[in-house]
Amino acid sequence: MGVIYLDNAATTPVAPEVRAAMQPYFEEVYGNPSSVHQAGRQARSAIEKAREQVAKAIGATPGEIVFTSGGTEADNAAIIGTAMAHQSKGKHIITTTIEHHAVLHTCEFLETMGYEVTYVEPGADGIVRIEKIEAAIRPDTILVTVMMVNNETGAIQPVQDIGALTRERGILFHTDAVQAVGTLAVDVKTLGADLLSLSGHKLHGPKGIGALYVSRNIKWTPILLGGAQERERRAGTENLPGIVGLGVAIELATEARDEKFQHLQELRTRMIDTFREQLGDVEVNGPDDALPTILNVTFKGVAAERVLMNLDMMGIAAAAGSACTSGSLQPSHVLMAMGKNEECVRSSIRFSFSGQNTLDEVTTAAEKVCQVVQRLRSRSFA
């Protein structure tokens, strides 16, 4: 049996069309985009085409797109750049306890620099309530940063409501949309977002490339200094093949999005149904209407680590949480924030799907998971 890959929230395989589009920029079109000769102009033209593709996908204008090395840099740049540009107005930031560590650790860094951060807790379903965000606002609040979709549970956050609230209060709003772009319709104007982060390798593009949307209407300070690349907003020679790949990937991801969404829902539902039919007492962590790319499940009485090792030997790839914290001895901060106890958290596994997964694959994987869990449980009670 070939590998059944169900860890797409960590990274996705590069689409064949993306690989083909990138290839010439490794071998034929290799000029520095800042050079004025023909090779440089060809490279610059490719970058600007990709900028248009990314902008169109999220309802922005090309001039509002800054290419980065990925979602982490985009989050760092959004938060630190906003904090630096608006510190004369205030030094208070609002975020949530379920954010990706690219946001949480950036906020913790700013706390060492004299900023104050309020960390809002989610409900038991993993969704942050707008009332809690509103209650945290102070006269010196300059930024609210809340992810669009949680990377461990798939819980979709009320970002449109948060955007409306922050706009009304004159506060800037950033959303980490890394898990949303390509699966959900994302429009920065509808969301009321002033800044938005996305990453190529989450939507069948290459690793090492992402983008930050920065509204033309806001003040923001770049955090990488050097050359005049990206209109002096992100210094450093551009990752030309990666940028081309991101442009093609995001264009492909937004095509036939509704059909893909329905397929993903079928995959997620099939896995849940199989678990409940064969195991009975599985607990789904997150809301019923979570993004269908992600399914987080607790298998009581067995350690997630042992289940994952057995699955890996059977050619099934899944995860115990965010790939960025793999190997950490700490239990998932997301599930803990939702009020789960440590035993529950250490028995939880994240399965994540892409449009490339088939119903047969997911059915086979679900049945194998049930076999492993039943076997491990029988040994525990023997």
Image: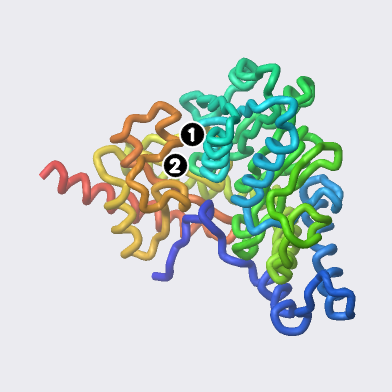
In the drawing, does residue 182 fall left or right of residue 96?
Answer: right
In the drawing, does residue 35 fall left or right of residue 21?
Answer: right
Which tag, 1 or 2, sits closer to the chain's start? 1
Mark 1 and mark 2: Cα distance apart in space: 7 Å
The tag on residue 296 is 2
Q: Is residue 126 visible?
A: yes
Q: Which of 326 and 290 is in front in this view?
A: 326
Q: Tell me if mark 2 has few (under 14), some (14-19) or many (20+) residues whose alpha carbon lies within 10 angstroms of its own.
A: many
Q: In which quarter of the image is the N terminus?
A: bottom left
- Could you tell me which secondary element the residue under label 2 belongs to? strand
Q: Which amino acid does label 1 sit on?
A: Gly
The tag on residue 45 is none
* Residue most extreme to the bottom: 28
Residue drawn where x is 76% and y is 84% of the image:
28
Residue drawn where x is 73% and y is 43% of the image:
186
Q: Quadrant of residue 90?
A: top right
Q: Which amino acid does label 2 sit on?
A: Asn
Q: Which of 6 and 74 is in front in this view?
A: 74
Which residue corresponds to mark 1? 286
Give the percent coordinates (x, y) of residue 167. Answer: 78, 26
Total marks shown come to: 2
In the drawing, does residue 101 fall left or right of residue 331?
Answer: right
Q: Tell me if mark 1 has few (under 14), some (14-19) or many (20+) residues whose alpha carbon lies within 10 angstroms of its own.
A: many
Residue drawn where x is 73% and y is 48% of the image:
222
Q: State yes or no: discs 1 and 2 in contact (Cβ < 8 Å).
A: yes
Q: In which quarter of the image is residue 313?
A: bottom left
Q: Nearer the viewer, residue 38 or 378?
A: 38
Give the percent coordinates (x, y) of residue 153. Answer: 49, 39
Residue drawn where x is 69% and y is 56% of the image:
68
